[in-house]
Amino acid sequence: MLSRELLEILACPRCKGDLTYDERRNVLICTNCRVYYPVEEDIPILLTDSARPLEELEVESQAENS
């Protein structure tokens, strides 16, 4: 789990916008860029190459709910 203090200073490496932590999926989401970044062993992987389209999470979520 990421600390509140860390979440307050993190920013999207693409647009410098705010990130939202999805604790259940263990990812950081940028709604401006519509991408998410993985968090591995409580370490945010904020590399532009690590960004994945937000649609991938939405598809996974729909599959889980089916």
Image (tube, helix red, strand yellow):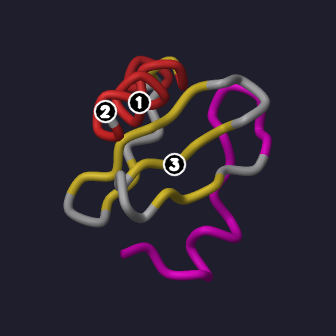
Mark earlier in primary sequence (3, 2): 3
For the N terminus, the image quarter is bottom left
Residue occupying image coordinates x 43% and y 30%? 57
Q: Which mark is residue 62?
A: 1
Label 3 and label 2: CA atoms lie apart by 24 Å
Above-or-below relation of 3 to 48:
below
Q: Position of residue 39 (x, y in %)?
A: 34, 51
Q: Specify the segment rendered in magenta.
A: 1-17
Mark earlier in primary sequence (3, 1): 3
Q: Is residue 29 left or right of residue 43?
A: right
Q: Is residue 64 left or right of residue 53?
A: left
- Which residue corresponds to mark 3? 28
- Which residue corresponds to mark 2? 66
Q: Is residue 22 left or right of residue 17?
A: left
Q: Position of residue 5 (x, y in %)?
A: 61, 81
Of marks 3 and 2, the one in the foreground: 2
Label 2 and label 1: CA atoms lie apart by 6 Å
